[in-house]
Image: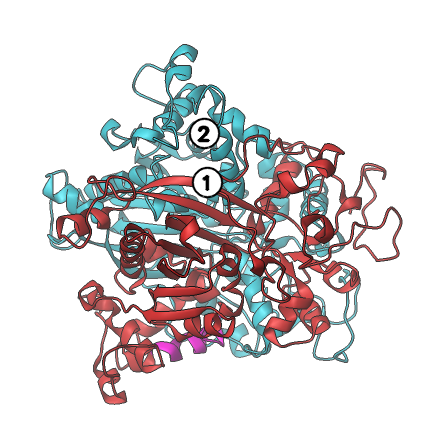
Chain colours: A red, B cyan
Amino acid sequence: MTTSHQPPGHIVLTSHPRGRGQKPRPIDWGASTPAARGPIVGSLTEPQRRNVIGAHNGSYGFFRALAVAAGTLDATHKPDLADTHPAVPIGPHPQWTEPNKIVSLDPWGHVAAEVFADDIRQGLDIRPTIAVTKAYLHVPELKDALAAGRLEADGKILKANGEAACTKIAVEPVWHLPSVAARFGIDENHLRRTLFSHSGGMFPELVTRDDLHVFLPPIGGATVYLFGDVEAIGDPARPVACRVHDECNGSDVFGSDICTCRPYLTHGIEVCLETAQAGGAGLIVYNRKEGRGLGEVTKFLVYNARKRHKDGDTAANYFARTECVAGVQDVRFQELMPDVLHWLGVTRIDRFVSMSDMKYEPLVRQGIEVAERVAIPDDLVPADARVEIDAKKAAGYWTPEPVASDVDLAAVKGRDWEA
Amino acid sequence: MTTSHQPPGHIVLTSHPRGRGQKPRPIDWGASTPAARGPIVGSLTEPQRRNVIGAHNGSYGFFRALAVAAGTLDATHKPDLADTHPAVPIGPHPQWTEPNKIVSLDPWGHVAAEVFADDIRQGLDIRPTIAVTKAYLHVPELKDALAAGRLEADGKILKANGEAACTKIAVEPVWHLPSVAARFGIDENHLRRTLFSHSGGMFPELVTRDDLHVFLPPIGGATVYLFGDVEAIGDPARPVACRVHDECNGSDVFGSDICTCRPYLTHGIEVCLETAQAGGAGLIVYNRKEGRGLGEVTKFLVYNARKRHKDGDTAANYFARTECVAGVQDVRFQELMPDVLHWLGVTRIDRFVSMSDMKYEPLVRQGIEVAERVAIPDDLVPADARVEIDAKKAAGYWTPEPVASDVDLAAVKGRDWEA
């Protein structure tokens, strides 16, 4: 990496543990205090002081590099973090220091500017990896819920005009590689080498810097929408509702009728508001994992293959088409998903708004109790999404109703494009 | 990069032009035919045959590497692209082969499986970087527009139940580095070295492989929602409407009232539908550039700093807060944005649904005529978003009304959190 001490033409292709310059500040992942854990130093203003692999801002870190290249950003700029601290206090919770409980985010990421204030004053460029703010939401479906009497306004959590108050939390991925490898049950060295090789040679430090255990991967993170009182979380006497929702831009934003994503999301918000109004807390966890982590190009190619199948777009062929194109049905890796709930202090979910065993099982494996599972109401399933939901039920999604047989699945057909 | 010919333990940190193995197939960017241009070979099933830097699927390529590491994906899997071809034909258009017209996507990306069918039959792993499908949208605001008489159902483009028919296109970034550098007016070598250094050492091949001119960057791409007849584009006798919308998940999905993003987006869809019903085409270009390309953590930190400012959250301080935290107001780089419109054959936009000069000027510089600019109707601006829209107008956003003075800007205050 270039540093201000090197001639501008000079570039170092990768660094090594025994390289020149001061040794990076150690990170003792899971240590009992922030001071003992040590700060995450991922900024590029002083590359020689970094103690992680990768860069901040997940998949947006690349735009910073482009801004420096284009000359619009001063490469030495350090953020002024005045007044940016959390709008609502979160933690500390026991989960933050339990071994292997949180492996893919920094539990101190939202208070980095406070707990490492002295280091920052002394010039160390430490950046928050989590931001906690407040928001007021206008979701059209909530107006319908009020009109239909499914929800009632209370004037604070939900107003009569459909406005919902929430705490909004953005979480950037911060991976402790030894713990992530353990979570997947694979060898850390294998994880590092494969992430390097099969990403097209991204971040050689994954291979060369075995002294650096923390990685800021260039992927999207999570956003939490918290309704009700954050204090209710972890209080056995108060209910917690949760939907873990994986990004589906075509449905979430544009209401595409080929899947149940937005209807299930807005139903989840309704359940969260009910639970908040009952004195509890409701959590929507929105993960940036478009198209099951395969991306939108793959997703649309699969839609085409489904619609053109000789038997039509049937539930029976739903998963097969994805595997033909992508080689795998899903790469969302829900094993890491419970981390954000551990960070919030969640130990029990009273109402889990999902039918997915891929989401349910990792939660239970990670020690989070799930009392009730809430299916999407049938009248919220778009006509063309019947294919998806029946295929998922037959593949083992939890459902209160009887599961369709193979024969039924062949009969469940989506719309013809030309219809 | 590891290849099947190397022992499993062996790893190559970066490649070099004069490395072992066959020379990569050359890419003649902008050549007049696909055969002359050559295929984009970015897949990792046979690393020695790659002729680009980076990996497919933008920011989701990393999940593929994780799937291989976790053992859920066979690293040698090649996609079965049967039946995945475009649902609607796009091009070829003259813009595809004009020098420096398209620099950040592959104009043949949607027909890669067809135009390079022989290479694929011979075992070359070529993947589409663009997918074209169809969708039927249920956007709640369109029902309101029908009820209010702002839109009328025609039974095909827009049904009485609010369902809108569209062509949906996902576009993955494919950068021709010499042309991208030229677009930014910077030296290619400077661009390559800075992207490498200031991304934390991502892709050393940016520095070592000056023989490879094409880069698949690990960032999000664009999704196009096309309403009406694709044939109308480029026909001087038929109108084209367009909104270029940059991702704002908090508003687009959750209706957060601090900005105008979703209201302006749904207004854009209305204008697109009107134009389609008038025999033209409407285009929504949705770019994955959350928080002006700075990401959601930075965005939420800025919200906190704005709300806590001693003078309150005023339009006068709107941009200043972002610069304090991020060091720059915006890293969306609209210079590359017109490429997808060139690819679609757009030469004139009759109704451009945006007030942003940052979007308007690159379009005009890139030779796209813009007839009318459509402001967001005042009654669609959420109360708390008045701060944003007035700050933007004062900063030079196009507006049909008089621009607020500095004094007014200090008076335009957003809601207090506790309100």
Q: Position of residue A168 (x, y in %)?
A: 43, 45
Look at the numbered discs 1 and 2 and tell me whether their residues touch, using CB distance below 8 Å: yes
Camera-nearest residue between B7 and A122: A122
Residue under pointer 1: A133
Camera-nearest residue between B74 and A151: A151
The secondary structure that most of the magenta stretch takes on is helix
| Residue at the (77%, 77%) spot, across then down | B9
Subunit ID for the residue under disc 1 = A
Q: Position of residue B197 (x, y in %)?
A: 72, 46
Amino acid type of disc 2? Lys
Amino acid type of disc 1? Thr
| Residue at the (37%, 19%) spot, across then down | B412
Q: Position of residue B119 (x, y in %)?
A: 54, 73
Decide if residue B332 is in sight here.
no
What segment carries the magenta color?
Answer: A318-331
The answer to whether residue B185 is above or below residue B55 is above
Horizontally, residue B98 falls left or right of residue B157, namely right
- On whether residue A329 falls in the magenta region, the answer is yes
Provide the secondary structure element on which disc 1 rests. strand
Residue under pointer 2: B307
Provide the secondary structure element on which disc 2 rests. helix
Horizontally, residue B320 falls left or right of residue A49, namely left
Q: Residues within 10 Å of mark 2 (few under 14, many from 20)?
A: many
Camera-nearest residue between A275 and A44: A275
The answer to whether residue A334 is above or below residue A139 is below
Q: Position of residue A298 (x, y in %)?
A: 44, 66
Query: Which of the 4 quarters of the picture holds residue A165?
Result: top left
